[in-house]
């Protein structure tokens, strides 16, 4: 294991940011810490980096006890949401910073910087100042800067959070490819489930200071441990006391399975290729189903039309405890 | 606003210039040939430079302390930094005499036994000047430190830099122009200091008389030409400082 987090707790005054957190992160993996804002995921990342200290518990990095090591001795690379570019230094000097601090020979620094700028596709921007780069380019520069010191782990705190949707998606793909090339153990924090599902080998879902579930994207999506994980990883709707995915709701114009509930289409909303159908059942449940436009058309759905809804056989769901229904996120 | 600035600043200062050159350059030449005035000008520069160096080092250090550290009494310290702006320089001078005075001061006699004379000598004048100009560097640097935040410093630390390296490579370049501006304001203020220096210097001709004291002396002795000429030199140095900085400073920086 590359990073071992054991029984870590951290409070800020009365606020409990992390409560007895245990996480193991494998060597060479790309791991996402996923959860809502204020859930403690960034705090965990900062504790791993040494930028914050845990109240109790221990951190081991590459087999080395790191709990009380200062950040500069942990050999971690850290990438910040807002880039933290050194504004007065050129892109090349930014990347060279860690090497200059380590007093490496000039020729070696130059060669390494060129190699890294190549890697992040910024070769022709080496002489520019960070202010002359776009957000995406700045974040790539920050990545190159963090990679320059050959860290044993690379930590990214909401690395694409400040970028617009299109650049975000590009950088996400690019990060995945970069990781396949460089193979450094990488942990990134995100509140975007799509980002985590798409990029990560392993996802750690963190909420209210606790780890809710750890697993591969498929494990989490197909076998969510609880309501929270289920609803955080994607849209959900409640069908006869079970949380299910709206795309796992089967809709028919005649009762074909015995457990199908009778209802009426109360609302239809088209978003791009997808149609979101809200059904009000005769026993008073409101169920949301999504389907493609073609499917909706072939069923001849329209507001007010009678329909029968059931859970697609074999699809996953989580039973909702009697005390309450979790709102879909 | 323009009229206000004109009546209060531009017009009076321009009158000093015209008065200084009322007889062509003879007035200026006369004071530059007077060894006592030249000594006073030199002393002024030495005292001002010492005070500026002290205020720059402590000002930057104090700013970092006020912005980057949390400690009890921080607000009180921040208020204390502004004190020199609100207290009359004369009071500052008297206060320094009470502490460092050679005969009756609280600390002065001890220092004097060890051969260090403070009051009625250059060290006292440097102290008084430094006291009066103390807030200027701090008030320039503090807002910039707040503005740049700690991101870059934290990033540098995560890349392996120690505190000293972070300061020289990251923090100082980021606050560079604030420091320069603070230094220039301090220099201008230090060159022109009058009240506090008058009290602690003893105003001894050719020894502890600074340029501002020369101006007063000449003015009181009806040597108006000399007074205006010296005043003109003082004003020119200060104006030049500010003009040079605003020319050199890159656009977009405050």
Image (spheres, grey):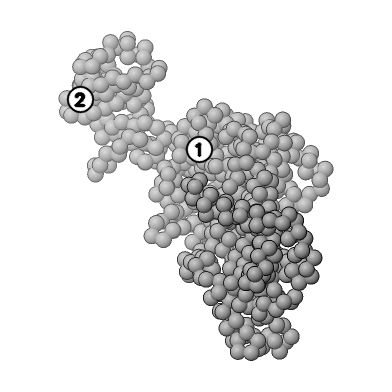
Q: What is the tally of numbered marks visible in this picture?
A: 2
Q: Residue B200 carries which label?
A: none
Q: Where is residue A207 drawn, in percent x and y?
A: 41, 46
Residue highlighted by disc 1: A161
Judge whether A254 appears above or below B164 on screen: above
The answer to whether residue B176 of the structure is visible from this angle is no
Numbered disc 1: secondary structure? loop
Q: Nearer the viewer, residue B67 or B212?
A: B212
Residue at left 55%, top 74%? B90
Q: Where is residue A34 drawn, in percent x and y?
A: 47, 41
Judge whether A117 appears above or below A166 on screen: below
Q: Which of B132 and A91 is in front in this view?
A: B132
Q: For the residue carrying disc 2, how many other residues have a C-alpha within 10 Å: few (<14), some (14-19), or many (20+)?
A: some
Residue highlighted by disc 2: A281
In the displayed structure image, the side of residue B143 where residue A279 appears, left or right: left
Q: To which quarter of the image does residue A200 belong?
A: top right
Chain under callout 1:
A
In the displayed structure image, the side of residue A101 where residue A12 appears, left or right: left
Numbered disc 2: secondary structure? strand
Contact, mark 2 vs mark 1 (Cβ under 8 Å): no
């Amino acid at each position: 294991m590359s990073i071992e987090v054991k029984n870590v707790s951290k409070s800020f005054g009365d606020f409990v940011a992390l409560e007895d957190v245990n996480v193991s992160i494998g060597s060479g993996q790309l791991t996402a810490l996923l959860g809502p804002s204020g859930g403690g995921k960034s705090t965990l990342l900062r504790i791993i980096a040494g930028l914050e200290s845990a109240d109790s518990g221990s951190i081991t990095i590459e087999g080395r006890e790191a709990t009380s090591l200062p950040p500069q001795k942990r050999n971690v690379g850290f990438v910040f949401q807002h880039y933290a570019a050194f504004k007065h230094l050129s892109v090349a000097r930014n990347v060279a910073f860690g090497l200059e601090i380590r007093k490496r020979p000039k020729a070696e620094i130059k060669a390494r910087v060129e190699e890294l700028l190549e890697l992040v596709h910024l070769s022709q921007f080496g002489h520019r100042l960070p202010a002359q780069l776009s957000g995406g380019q700045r974040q790539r520069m920050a990545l190159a800067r963090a990679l320059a010191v050959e860290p044993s782990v690379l930590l990214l705190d909401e690395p694409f959070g400040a970028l617009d949707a299109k650049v975000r998606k590009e950088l996400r793909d690019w990060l995945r490819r970069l990781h396949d090339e460089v193979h450094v153990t990488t942990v990134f924090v995100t509140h975007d489930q799509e980002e985590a599902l798409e990029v990560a080998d392993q996802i750690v879902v963190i909420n209210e200071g606790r780890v809710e579930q750890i697993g591969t994207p498929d494990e989490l999506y197909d076998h969510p441990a609880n309501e929270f994980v289920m609803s955080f990883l994607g849209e959900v709707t409640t069908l006869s006391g079970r949380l299910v995915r709206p795309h796992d709701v089967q809709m028919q114009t005649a009762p074909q399975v015995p457990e199908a509930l009778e209802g009426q289409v109360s609302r239809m909303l088209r978003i791009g290729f997808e149609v979101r159908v809200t059904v009000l059942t005769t026993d008073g449940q409101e169920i949301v189903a999504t389907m493609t436009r073609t499917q909706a058309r072939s069923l001849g759905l329209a507001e007010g039309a009678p329909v029968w809804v059931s859970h697609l056989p074999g699809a996953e769901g989580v039973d909702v405890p009697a005390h309450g229904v979790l709102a879909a996120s | 606003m323009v009229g206000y600035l004109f009546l209060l600043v531009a017009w009076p200062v321009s009158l000093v210039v015209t008065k200084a050159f009322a007889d062509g350059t003879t007035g200026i030449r006369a004071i530059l040939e007077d060894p006592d005035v030249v000594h006073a000008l030199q002393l002024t520069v030495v005292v001002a430079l010492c005070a500026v160096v002290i205020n720059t080092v402590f000002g930057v250090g104090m700013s970092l302390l006020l912005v980057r550290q949390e400690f009890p009494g921080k607000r009180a310290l921040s208020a204390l930094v502004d004190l020199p702006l609100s207290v009359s320089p004369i009071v500052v001078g008297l206060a320094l005499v009470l502490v460092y005075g050679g005969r009756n001061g609280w600390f002065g006699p001890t220092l004097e036994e060890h051969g260090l004379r403070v009051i009625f000598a250059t060290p006292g004048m440097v102290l008084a000047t430094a006291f009066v100009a103390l807030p200027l560097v701090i008030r320039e640097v503090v807002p910039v430190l707040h503005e740049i935040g700690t991101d870059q410093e934290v990033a540098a630390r995560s890349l392996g830099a120690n505190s000293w390296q972070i300061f020289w490579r990251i923090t100082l370049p980021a606050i560079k122009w604030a420091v320069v501006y603070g230094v220039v304001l301090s220099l201008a203020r230090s060159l022109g200091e009058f009240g506090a220096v008058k009290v602690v210097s003893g105003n001894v001709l050719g020894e502890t008389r600074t340029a501002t004291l020369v101006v007063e002396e000449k003015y009181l002795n009806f040597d108006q030409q000399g007074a205006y000429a010296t005043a003109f030199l003082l004003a020119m140095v200060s104006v030049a400082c500010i003009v040079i900085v605003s020319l050199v400073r890159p656009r977009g920086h405050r």
